[in-house]
Amino acid sequence: MSVKLNSRESDDVTVIDISGRISLGEGSGVIRDTVRDLTTRGNRKILLNLRDVGYIDSSGIGELVSCFTLAANAGGKLKLLSLNKRVRELLQMTGLYTVFDVHEEEADAVRSFK
């Protein structure tokens, strides 16, 4: 199953619900393209909801870092929501867990942008 995205607004935060696999060859570039498009249109508060991500590999982690950098370079912030065990472990192993602002509850994540 390839990656699927659904964007929605919660207050002034754009939430991108991601489902499927974020891996090499599974269309992970679509996440970066979506974040780039959002920042180009002036969206500076982006929340990636990873609740329904069934698999992520090192390429997928690189994609998340790329999205984080895109948002930061545009003067925005990108945060992560609802990491599954695999994503959390990969971020911890790579030392990136401390780079991302990670939340378990969407309401808390949205409030954290203020």
Image: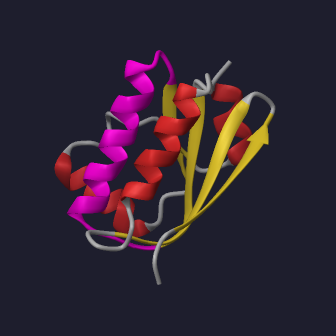
Q: Position of residue 79 (x, y in %)?
A: 51, 37
103 w.r.t. 50: above or below:
above
Q: Quadrant of residue 29?
A: bottom left
Prevailing secondary structure of the magenta residues: helix
The residue at 31%/69% (across/down) is: 23
In the image, the segment drawn in magenta is 54-76
* Quadrant occupied by the C terminus: top right
111 w.r.t. 103: above or below:
above
Q: Position of residue 109 (x, y in %)?
A: 64, 37
The residue at 63%/27% (across/down) is: 112
Res 97 visible: no
The residue at 62%/27% (across/down) is: 43
Q: Position of residue 11 (x, y in %)?
A: 81, 31
Q: Quadrant of residue 74?
A: top left
Q: Position of residue 102 (x, y in %)?
A: 48, 42
Q: Quadrant of residue 110?
A: top right
